[in-house]
Image (tube, rainbow, N blue to C red):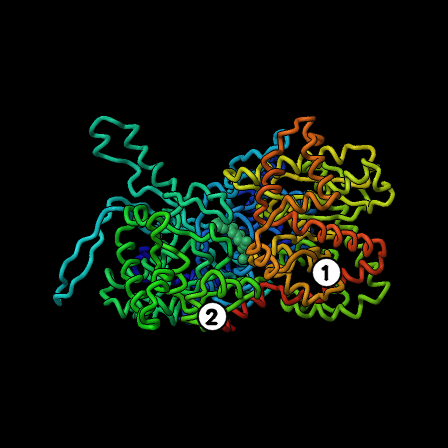
Amino acid sequence: RDLGPARTPTHPVATAPVNGPLFSVDGFVKEFIHELNTAQGVALARSSVNDQYLALARTVKNYLMARWLDTNRKTREAKVKTVGYLSAEYLLGRQLGNALLASDLNEIADKGLELCGLDLVTLRNQEVEPGLGNGGLGRLAACFIDSLATMNVPCIGYGIRYEYGIFRQTFVDGRQVEQPDTWLALGSPWEFPHPDASVQVNFGGHTEKYRDADGKERTHWLPDWNVLGVPYNYMVPGYLNGRVNTLRLWSAQATKAFDLPTFNAGDYAQAVRAQTFAENISKVLYPEDSTPQGKELRLQQQYFFVACSLRDFIDNELEDDFDLHHLDERIILQLNDTHPVIAVPELMRILMDEKGFDWDEAWAVTTKCFAYTCHTLLPEALEVWPTELLGRLLPRHLEIIYAINEQLLEEVREAYPGDELRARRMSIIAEFPERGVRMAYLATYAATKVNGVAALHSQLLRDKVLPDFSEMWPDRFTNVTNGVTPRRFVKMANPKLSELISDTIGGGWVTDLERLRELEPFADDPDFRAQFAAAKDWNKRRLAEVLRKRDGIDLPDGHLLDVMVKRLHEYKRQSLKLLHVVSLYEQVISGKLPVDQLTPRTVVFGAKAAPGYKMAKDTIHLINRVAATVSADPRLEGRLKVAFPANYNVTLAEKLIPAADLSEQISLAGMEASGTGNMKFALNGALTIGTDDGANVEIRELVGDKHFFLFGMNEPQVAELGAKGYNPESYYEDNPQLKAALDLVLSGHFSGGDQHLFDAVVYNLLNSDRFMALADFQSYVDAQARVEERYADTDAWTRSAVLNVARSGFFSSDRSMREYIQRIWHTQPMM
Ligand code: T68
């Protein structure tokens, strides 16, 4: 980036620190109207809600601007170590509410807008959330950068500015239909593009050897095409602390908008079309959660953002004369799953081919600069890139990966002489079903630390996914249990509960969540419980309003609100929840259960399915059909309702989670790495019904068995049953309640008499049931009976809910960040 000659301004205004608008209602109104008039180019009287929203966003941004510039300057001057968080996904949620909170502008904005005849809530609802992630992994990245800013830790989040984020889900006749997410269409007030700071990224071609001036053999990559990465900066404001970190997302642009030879050959249209090809790279987020499809464009995306980010940090964040042998003193690059792992050979390439390091020097630096977080246990979720593809797209990187692998295998053979099987097992290069690069192995070998995301997950990662590596390098492995930001998911999403908490124990909990413990004694205070319950009711009424407007769904009063929201995946077992619903319904309509013995309950599902995941889409269809049938059946007398609002996203989560009574966390034990929704529910006073899986284990330990509804097999039992041979049909034959539920689906009751519409879902359960839903069915139903019993005793329920809040402070992402800092990153907060 060309910053031009040094400047020596003489005007006092040019040398003064940047000043934001005045922190008062007057200052706010002035700035708002100014933005409306000069940036939007409209008068208040003629402005649309979108004009007003954009002007408001820019106004708030202007308040944060001085702090941002200040943060950047101070960080640069201090030359401290920065966290470079590398993530292909950031599921940010709406920005305005968070920015208002972080800058303490809520009250001023509210009053100021009122004086303009406008309503803050209406303007907030105008924002389209940037859905630049699939689910938990992307949302975790967003929580982490929020915590780092709040804790005054220098961090740059690096990622991709997808033009289309996660698809918008609609239902047509109960089936999922995907619509493009046009989040940029109405304007993007939160971003700062810097086309002048674009970075070139190369692809393809071949490599050549040559001798440098010292006679050393060196390699040269001669790529055959390239694109530009344009950085877009976003503010990441800390909570009331004056720090504003940066999220830098890269957008792909053609290096040459125009192909002159083609034009000269007479094809004008083709000459311009070259542009679209390059720009495809950041066009769309892959909606595949947990099952990467190995598509070429996806590898292009991964290399694209990682190459841009490394180049940006080295060229623009470090001093010109910085000695890269000490790179690890200035950055730690956190690999958010394997998606950015191509950064490892990329850094090796830069150091060797561009900076003249020899192999050992480059490897010594590289291995100090990376740490790797794994987010899964599913074998199909571990990325393996075919060498054919990788070599075609990134020939130099494949060479480097082969060389890294040779070194790894040498180390293995030295440590375990004669154990050739082990060497083959640990090879970064897989030979079957095709030759491929195991990205998790590459990451594990290169990283200083490898972590799982919950205690159980980290243990299973060591024992089952990477046993050879953890045996050879036990100290490299660690656990950091995930967390969630209390700013967005409690303070912002649950204002009534937040007010009650602050009135009771003061406001310090927002940045020191363990202080929620101080609420424990109030669980026995009837007055406090009444206020707590009142906040829950308020949240339910707010949700009812949202669902009525957004989805045309009516939420009945006084129901137990039973919520299962997460990606649709077989391992998460939405089908188990559905079987429970169908079973309750079946028992009532068959006369086995008097309707007045049914606890009034509304079950809410929210889930997107990967567009190519047939079983998941069929399950969505079935849920919708069951929802329609059950909710319309007069025999249920409004005592059981199933709601499935389309397009579950962060914005809806912020309304749904605070209203929930019961949190469904029912994955097969050993399958959910952590979960983070589970934490958000507990912190908002929902009780969990869950398996011993992921972070559920830790939630249960902390809130106590009495306040958590545990069911199902644990991980060793799952392994044992699998080893013994699992026969789902035997559960169907032996359990009349389960049989009746499945038979009702097979009868066509939910499909207008079509007896085969849901064959795929039902026979998958009966014949294979990879995630053992039928094995856990009875235990789940029994646990639901315990839920109903507790719910019938309002005081006992509320007491448990209060204790869930009071004992869940551990699940703040601030705590997660503290652990990364102390055990993995060794960075310092700035004062
Ligand atoms: C989730 N993973 C875990 N993956 O499933 C969840 N995958 O248990 C955990 O709490 C969370 O990560 C945070 O650690 C994902 O969300 C993906 O979204 C994903 C996306 C692309 C490819 C593979």
Q: How would you rate the neighbour count of disc 2 (Cα within 10 Å): few for under 14, some for 14-19, many for 20 or more?
A: many
Q: How would you rate the neighbour count of disc 1 (Cα within 10 Å): few for under 14, some for 14-19, many for 20 or more?
A: many
Lateral position of residue 560 relative to residue 13, left or right: right
Q: Identity of the amino acid at label 2? A: Ile
Lateral position of residue 562 relative to residue 403, left or right: right
* Res. 412 visible in picture: yes
| Residue ID for mark 2 | 824
Asked if residue 344 is positioned above or below residue 202 in the image, the reply reads below
Element at label 2: helix
User: Residue 765 at what x, y percent from top left?
Assistant: 61, 42
The one nearer the camera, 255 or 202, is 202
The one nearer the camera, 762 or 136, is 762
Asked if residue 247 is positioned above or below residue 516 in the image, the reply reads above
Q: Residue at x 72, y 31 (%)?
A: 749
Q: Quadrant of residue 627?
A: top right
Residue 708 numbered tag = 1
